[in-house]
Every structure is written in C-alpha cells, then in structure tokens.
Image: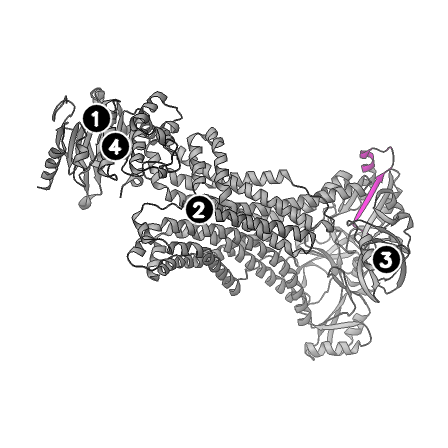
Amino acid sequence: MKNDGGGGSLWVMTAATPPASLTPLTGTAAAGAVDAMKVYGRGDSEVRALDGVTVAFEKGRFSAIMGPSGSGKSTLMHCLAGLDSLTSGAVYIGDTYLASLSDKQLTELRRTQVGFIFQAYNLVPTLTALENITLPLLLGGTKGDQQWIDRVIDTVGLRDRLGHRPSELSGGQQQRVAVARALASQPTIIFADEPTGNLDSRTGAEILTFMQLAVRELGQTIVMVTHDPVAASYADRVIFLADGRIVDEMAEPTAERVLDRMKRFGD
Amino acid sequence: MFRIALKSTLARKGRLFLTAVAVIAGCAFLSGVFVFSDTIKASFNTLFANAYAGTDAFVRSSNVIEGDFGDESRDRLPSNIVDDVAGLPGVSAAYGDVQGFARIATSDGTVLGQVGPPKYGGAFIDAEQSPWQLAEGTAPASDGEVVIDRRSAKEGDVSVGDTVSITGAGGVRDFTVSGIATFAGNDTAGGSTWALFDLATASQFVVGQPDRIDSVIVVGDGSLDDEALATSIQQALAGSEVEVLTGAEITAENQDAIEQGLSFFTTFLTIFAALSLFVGSFIIYNVFSISAAQRQRENALLRAIGASRGQVTRVLFTEALVVGVLGGVVGFGAGVLLATGIMKLLSSIGLGPSGTELTISPSAFVITLVVGVAVTLVCAVVPAIRSGRVPPLAALRDVSVDKSAVSRSRLVTGIVFLAIAVAGVALGLTSDPVWLAAGVVGLFVSLVVLGPLVAAPVARALTPALRGLRGVTGEIAARNAAASPKRTALTAGALGIGLALLVGVSTLGSSIKTSIRDTIAEQFTGDFAISTSDAEGSGFGGLPGSVADELVAVPQVDAAVGVGINLLNVIEDGAPSVKRVLTLDPTQAGKLLDLPFTAGGWADLDENGILVAADKAARDGLQVGSTLDVSFQDQSARTLTVAGLFDSDTFGNLIVSRSLYQGQDLPLFDAQILVRTADGISEADAEAAIRTVTDNYPTSKVQTRDQFIDDQTKQVDGFLNFIYALLLMSVFIAVLGIVITLLLAVYERRRELGLVRAIGMTRPQVRSSIRWEAFVTAVLGVVMGVGLGVSLGWIVVRALADQGLDSFSVSGLSITVFAVLAIVFATIAAWWPATRAAKSDILQAIATT
C-alpha cells in the first residue's frame, strides 16, 4: 500500500472548489468526488444522503465503501457512476467532470469508461452470456479488443457457457458474466454494488477472487459497495461512511478489523 | 375481498385505463352504429310524419306489381279520380300527386344534387296542408313553370325567374323557376332534389303518361274521423281498383319501409362493429394475461397469507367487471361522439337531414354496456383461473414474465383445427356451403392456436436482418418479441385478423374486377360507351331512347345500341310476375355485342321474340321456339317466342327488342349506349362526332372502351373502399393492441431497461429497440393476416364460382399497401411505449429491494 489515510490520494477540500481548478489533480485518480452533497426533500423532511464527501479512487486498486444502512454508500456510488446527480459539489471519472455532461454524453461515458456489477438483475434475459458480455461494446457499435475479451472470458472461466441464456446459468455464473461484462470494454473504473449479496459464501468468495484478479493481473480499477466485512477484506482499501460523511478509512483490511470497525458504528 | 379487489384495481389507474381502451374502442363503434341508425330512423320518421301531416286519407291503386328483387311498384290512376274524390261527403279538398324522376340542371348545364339521394319530380300541391311551402315566388301556373327545393336553388344559385333545364320521362325541356319551396321548414326532403310542376305537367313530363297520377291526397272537412273518411271513400269508389288509407296508415307504411331498409344497413354495420370487438377481445385477453403474470407475486402473497384460489380468481374478475363497465360507459359516450361526427359530416356535404338531434335510446346504452361487460368477462376467464392457480411459493421467487413455452399439445390442437378448416372448406366447396362456416372458424382458431408456434421462428428469422439494420438494438427487439411467443402472437394475431379481413375483401374485390374486365373485354367489341349518372334501375331515368337513334345517324358511327332496363309482366304458372328485361335494338347489338349464344342469336330476335339466359331456360324448361306470355303495365298482353339462349351473367335473364314496346305510352330510357366507330375513323374524330349528339344531354358521359371498362370496375372500388373504411376500425384497435402490449412489456421490463441504460444504452437506442419490437410484431401480424386473408378470399371466390365469379385474382398492390401501412402505423404508434421506456428511471430499476 502506497497510501494510508489522510495521504495524497485522499484530498480533503475545505471549500466547494470550482471543478475546473481541479483538473490537474485528477491525473492519478480513476474517479472521485469533491465536496459531494446530495439532499432529498426540504425543510423538516430534509435528508442529507451525502454531506460533503470528498474522495478519490486511485487507478489500479480495489476499493470498498462500507457503512450501515442509510449511510449514503449507494448514493455515493450512483453519483460517482453518473447514474444520479449531486445537489452540489462535483464528481469526475478520469479527467471528465460529470455535472457538465448531457444525458447522451453521460450514457456514452458509462458505456466506455464505467463498468457495472449489480447485486441482482445484472443480465439481459433474452441475450446469451457472450452477448451480455459484449453488450456495452455492441451498443457503441464497436467490436472491442478481441484478445482482451478472450482473456477476460478465460479469467472468469466462462468459455463453455458463452451460448447460454441467463436463465440457464447459476447465480454464481450469472455474476461471473456480469464481472466479464464490466471488464470487457476496459473501463476506467468498475463499480460493484453488493456483487455477492445474492450469493452463498463460497460462490461469493469465487466472484471476489475474480474481482481481485481483475485488479491485480488485468490492472483494472474497482470500487465496491458492500456491508459484508468478508467481502470488504478482498479490497486494498476500505472507506467507511456514516450519515453521508466519510468517517474512517482502512488499508490492507482483514474481515476481523473491518467487523470491529463496523461494530463501533453501533456505539 | 371485493373491496380489496376494487382497491387494487383502482390503485393502478394506468393499467385500468390501458385494459379499458380496447373495450372502449370496440364499444364506441357498436354504440356509434346504434345511435347513428336510431337517429337516421327518427329523422325519416319525422320526415314522413311531416310529409303526411295534412293528409287525412290517401288514395292509390290497389294493383301492386311485385318485382323479382323485392322492388314493388303500383299501377297509376286516371287523373279524373281527383274530382270524383273531391266531391265526396266529408272531403274538403283532394289533390292529385305524381312522383317520378326529374333531373334539374342550371342554364349552364350544371346538374344539381349529389350522387346517392334520388332526383324527384312531382306535383306541387298549393295547399296549407302540404309539407312543401313556398319560400319565394309563386306556384307553377303553366306547363313552362317549375318550383324547386331550396337546397337545389342554393346549390345552383338559382333565383325565381331563372331558367333551368329539366330531364324527365318527357325528354329535356327548359322551365322557368316560378318559386322556391321548403319541406316542413327544411331546405329539402331526404337530401334529394325536387322539381315540382302543376299536376298536368307532372303527369305528362315526369311520368310520361298524360292524365295518369300516382295517388290522391285527401283533406277532410272535419265531419268524419280519418277512419270513417277512408271507409266512406273506399265505398264510394267501389268498383275501381283503388285502396284508401288514412293519413296515419300511409305514414306508418312509409316509416316501416324505411325501417326495413335501414335494418339491413344497421345489421351490416353491426357485423363490422362485432368484428372490431372480436379483434379487441384478443387485446383484452392479452392485457389480462399480462396483468395476471405481472401480479403473480402479489397473488402468491395473497395465497400465502390465506386467500383461497377462488378469492384470487375473483380479484381478477372484479377488475374485469370494472374494466367492462368503464369501457362500456366510456365507449358508449365515444360512440355518441362518433355518431355526432358522422351526422355532422353527412349534413356538411348536404346528405341526410339537417339540424337533426341525436336519438339516444336507452336500449342502445344497455346493449353496449352488456356487450362490453360480457366480452371483457369472457376474456378474463382464463387469466383469472390461471392467476388463482399461482402457488403461494411464487411469492418468494423473482419471476413475473410469462415465459411458458409453447407445448406439443398446442401443436397437435393447432393441426387438428387446421385439418378441420381444410376439411370444412373442401366439403363446403364440393357439397353443402354450410361446411364453409366450420372451415372458416377452424382457420381462425388454428391461427390463434398456432400463432405462438410461428411467432418465435418468425422473430428469430428477422433477427439477422434487424441486427444488420439496427445492430444490437434491433437484435434485442427481435429477441424480446421471440421471448414471449404467446403474447407476441396474440398481439400480432389481432392485427392479423384485421388485416386478413382487409386482404380477404380486397382479394374478393380484385377477383370480381378481373371477372368483370374479362367478361366486358370478351363481349363488348365496340369502341365507346355512353352512360349517364341518372340511370336508376327499372326505367327510372337515363338517356332518352332517341339518343341512340341520333348516334346511328352519325356517319362516323358504324353501330350504336342503347341498352335500357325495363319491366315486363311475364306470366309464369298462370300468374304475372314482373321481371326486369333488357331492351335493345338487335340489329345494332349484333355489330358490337358478342354475347355467347348457346342457341339462336341476335338475328333471330324480332319484336315478337325474347332471348333467355341459358340457366334460367334450363330451370324453366324453355328452349328456342318455346313461348312466353307477357303483359304490359296497361294490361295489354302479348306472346313472345324464345329466339335464343345465351350464357352470360352480365345481361340479366331476359333480353327483348325495344320494338316490343312500340305503341306503349311508356317512354324508353337507355342506361347505356354502346358505340362502334366506322372503319377508318380515328378515335378523336369519332369522339368529337359522338359528342355533337351527346352534348345535348348534360349528364351523359362519353368513354372510350378502356375508360368504360375501368369505370365498371370502379364501382367495385367504391364498395370496397366503404368496406375498408369499416374494417379500418378493427385494424385501428389491433394497432392500439400493439401499443398497449408494449406499454405493459415496458413496465414489466423496467429493471432490464434500467440495466441496459446503466451500462450504456442511449435513450434513442432504447426507443429504437421498442419501435423495432413493434415492427417485428407487426410483420408477424402481416404474415398471419395476408396468409389468412388470401385463403379467405380464395374460399369466398370459389364458393361464388357459380355466380359468374370465374377468376381468382390477388391484388398485390393493395395487399402491399395494407401491409406497409400496418407496419408503419404500428411502428409509429410505438413511440409512446418507446418514450416511456427511454424515460425509465435507472436507479429505481436497479434498486435491489
């Protein structure tokens, strides 16, 4: 681990800085947020899902975002991925600030620079495994890098299942297809939302290992939202969120340390 | 439970609305037909009530002349009967009346009136009891004056004192307009044009029989009631062949006649309304099936917490009831609007009674509501039972899409029905036509049963094309269509049936046209045909017989034959029966009509001869040399000898020489004049020469042979277009069905749509995928519809083969037009679900809970 908490990769901004001034700083980060605020409702019913979050995710690393229910971890991920918009502040992917993008440009960005792995309902039921894997490429009208796709398919071990429909695959196999799809376009960053939430622990471990492999051997960048300490222990670094703020960070996590930290949220 | 069901139904207003739309559309057509025909009926009732409002008794001949085709005419009365009646006790006044054909043209030759309503001539009765009252000017005072209806006056910008040219039985004559009249306050009666003369002129000019009238209108002096008045006149006229009716009786008789005439029309329209409900029922069934599938978890939850099967089934039935009632009521309202629109349209083009208020009868509402609810409930039976069968465990599974695969038993059932269809058709064509009904029903059922089996392969076959055309969005569209074959097939099936009817009708029409074309081409060897828009069947208008004679005298003309349609009493089995006969000049006909004679020929036909169709001759046991006793309207009798037999369906059953009518005071009209150009004369020269004669007859239309043949087939086109317009409603409902199904599919696939949006599908791509899915569904519908439609057309044409329909012809052009239109409309109509899909909220779609 090059960076520990409070170091260079995690900036703490004191004010809402205009995005343009940050451009040079995005060089080492795959994605990040600057003073991100997300407020639902008004007046008494106002809920601050994100309350001034500033964070950056380095290239080539596997990060986990943890926190109790309602801590804002899913909202943060959705905003980072361009699926949702901030009330104020800024998010960027690579060297692009998302706020300035139209829906069309955002879609394009998600297709080319972002990969997704959701908890469930990851695949289009009418398409085969291979078609699902290459769907983002097909949508963009490109073939992609065939060598890379072959490598991804071999890494997740799906070579003999490519012609199957999702309904003919097990839950673990479906998630492997989802991982392969996220990797297929060599995105800048991959977001995973509770990717093992619907799987038994053995299959979950398998998927997490693939994700680890993708980072360590294929050089990808993954940000994973989870509430499972065991899942978080596969990451290089864990960020803890509570009440819409970053409250802690941990490098080289183990399941025990993460669990201990999580227990303190109850205090 | 009922309250839960009602709540759940009302909570999903969108779905409720979608389901109701198909019911609404079907009911609207049905109630539109009811309201429209009720209104027309009521306006005619008012018309006749007005017409006879001042009539206390009505005298006419008791001699009824029954026609072959249900058409009925009456003998005329001598005009001196008016004075006889006027002198009877209890009678304050008696007026003679005449009714016949009269066409009004302005001084510049423009003919007044529209195609459709008749052009009447009659006597102007200058009395306060007459429905016709002068709006301007005076009553006709001499045989050179006429009163015309105000509608015609407005149309032709005719004022009192202007000259109009009128064609009647007495030829073409100029009259001075002495007055302009209204009918019971309306510009005209029944949309017709009316030329009203003094009685003597009317007899002579309109019916061509001086001193003969049609009826006497009697006004009582109040000393007797109508019944007693009629009885006393009847007694006073005992001995002469008259019949006396009260004013109420003659009103009721006319109203009944109109009602009968309309009931055919109403039945005809109701059949089409039923067809669109039938097509709509596919949609209703589909919507309930999808809605039941989408609610599988909800139903399973109800079952898990203790609801019985019956209760779950009843929830869906309750929904169906609500949808049916809503659809029936709203549909009835829409139908009233539809009828209002049609009435407005009709009155704006001058047809139909103006200022008529809609007649909305309670029975129309009740029938519409009952039909709407019944159709909806029937459609809900299977989905409701199926939703009751959901196992409680399904509550725990995340499945909602109806993916039930197509089964082997479906294939077997489909083939059985197809076999029934083939057997029915084969039996129907060879023996009793009743079997055809079984055949056609079998065809429809097998379409419904086999549809899902065809749906997936067709969608799959389209996949590579769509992939090539639209890339992955096209592919996803085709895959989605193939994923739920039953649903796709039902949606497409609705469109297929609508199209099948269109294609079937077009095939029938095209075959009829080809038959007509072939027959005319074979039998008419002349070069020109002259027709008139005034020919109205049996001797009622047309071109005066003198026109053909004038044409024969033109040097550029080799031969000209006038063909008239007249009535002749033929004594069959001792009783006279009125037949339509063609009258023509056989010496001219021989030069340009190549009638396929099986015995005898034109040369054998003289004024004592008659030509008989071979099949009629075979029925009646007639052959060349047999005799037929006939009589004319003036009761004079003749005996005709069969001079030849012909095998053609174009010329009716009987042909006589026009010289047969010489000496009758019946003027001969020709419906058509066929002309053959003399050798060596160019078409242009011949036409110019013909026009020097026909230009004196403003409505005559000179056509070359090709134009004439085209024109004959155009009559079929007019009828076809009318049927197409009625069938369009079914196609409209079917396209609506595609939209509804897709909207429900979009709702069902909202998670999938959110997913593909998240991983980079643009909004236009989402829209395009939905539109192409509509395209695939429509193509499937077209495949089914064209196949079924051509089969239906073939069956009907074959069944009618002995009616002279000897050609089977498929109109590739109209089928292509229907197919392209259906696909284009379906694709365009899909913009709504497509926009919905493109708007799907990604976050909501991918939310785990």
In this rendering, the answer to whether B595 lies above or below B181 is above
Residue B626, quarter of the rendered image: bottom right
Q: Which residues are magenta?
A: B669-687
Q: x%, y% of residue B627?
A: 89, 59
Task: Decide whether residue B685 is among the magenta residues.
Answer: yes
> Is the Cβ of the residue at disc 1 closer than 8 Å to that at disc 4?
no
Q: Which residue is mark 3?
A: B622
Mark 3 in CB contact with mark 4 (< 8 angstroms): no
Q: Label 2 belongs to which residue?
A: B740
| Residue A18 badge | 1
Chain bearing mark 2 = B
> With B244 as the anchor, is A251 left or right in this view?
left
The residue carrying mark 4 is A207
Q: What SS does tag 2 mark?
A: helix
Task: Check chain identity for marks 1 and 3: say if they share one.
Answer: no
Seen from the viewer's position, the closer of residues B23 and B632 is: B23
Q: Secondary structure at mark 3?
A: loop
